[in-house]
Image (spheres, rainbow, N blue to C red):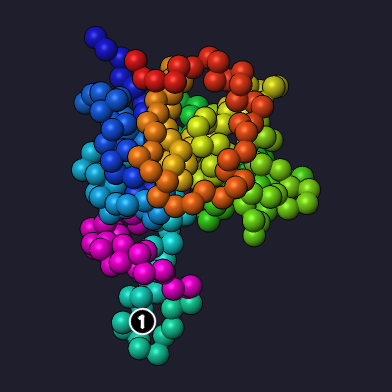
Amino acid sequence: MTASRTIVIGDVHGCLEELDELLRLLSVRSSDRLVFVGDLLDRGPDPIGVLRRVRELGADCVLGNHEERHLRYARHEARRTIDPRYRNPMRPFPPKELAEHRSLSKDDLAWMARLPVLLEVMPGWIVVHGGLEPGRSLSEQIPTRVIRLRYVDAAGRFVASDDPSRPPPGARPWATVWKGPYHVIYGHEVHDLSSPRVDRNEKTNAECWGIDTGCCYGGKLTALILPTREIAQVQAKAAYVQAPESFRASAHPSQAQALSRVSRHAR
């Protein structure tokens, strides 16, 4: 009997063709559990198609900051229709994203509104979109931070940054100081356009896997397969949006050792 797998897929961002190719590569079985790290929407060529494919699959997904933004915008617009004097305080969507937003059905919005911000997918393994603040229990994590976290201060608390590629003075990537007890899989931040980033705490062996490899920027769409820690990837068909220069940096040194223990393709 073939063992079931938990397959966690990184930020898809509208790349439906690549998602379908990855699913074919994985030969997904009915016994497998599919989990997405959020940010299904925006940037790529078919965000609505991606969201509805994930819904059709009956897959699990955590809330990404892009889904949260569309939900928040919808709430403001709903209030504006009731009260013409009300002004939506959010920055207007660009034309492409506005058209995308208007294509979301009530069922799509309701599905997104039910997404959790964190999900334990196997004993000891947590999936989030952004990250977790070290020193806080799961019940103490703040949802708006979980979906956006990149950097923390010396006390392990969320630090906002105007430029995600450059940490504020004294701040560090949260995954570099995470001590567990859970292993964490996350998206949200593109560390490299080819390889996932793996940080492992030397004392506790807690692992943090950043699996957003920038498919929408012309990178790869990545899946992490549990419990074996195998990696499956497909190359983007195109660079649908321009990648910031910082995303093209070399892989973090912690990747070399970790990736030597996993295969690049699903078996």
Question: Which residue lies at the image location 39% right of the left edge and 55% below the top edge?
Answer: 42
Query: Which quadrant holds residue 154?
Result: top right
Give the image location of residue 144, x and y in percent. Answer: 53, 56
Q: Quadrant of residue 228?
A: top left
Q: Is residue 27 above or below residue 120?
A: above
Q: Is residue 134 left or right of residue 61?
A: right
Q: Which quarter shows the C terminus?
A: top left
Drawn side of residue 66 relative to residue 209, left or right: left
| Residue found at x 42% / y 32% | 222
Quadrant holding the N terminus: top left
Q: Nearer the viewer, residue 232 or 63?
A: 232
- Amino acid type, callout 1: Arg
Tell me if residue 117 is in the magenta stretch: yes
Residue 215 rendering spot, x and y as whole percentages: 42, 41
Can residue 52 be seen in the rendering of this structure? yes
Q: Is residue 259 left or right of residue 111?
A: right
What x and y, as percent, mark residue 253?
A: 66, 27
Residue range corresponding to the magenta coloring: 90-118
Q: Which residue is mark 1?
A: 80
Asked whether the viewer can see residue 180, the reply is: no
Q: How far across and how far down the image is residue 11, in percent? A: 42, 43
Query: What residue is drawn where x is 31% and y is 38%?
Result: 19
Secondary element at tag 1: helix
Instruction: Name which quarter of the figure residue 121 lies in.
Output: top left
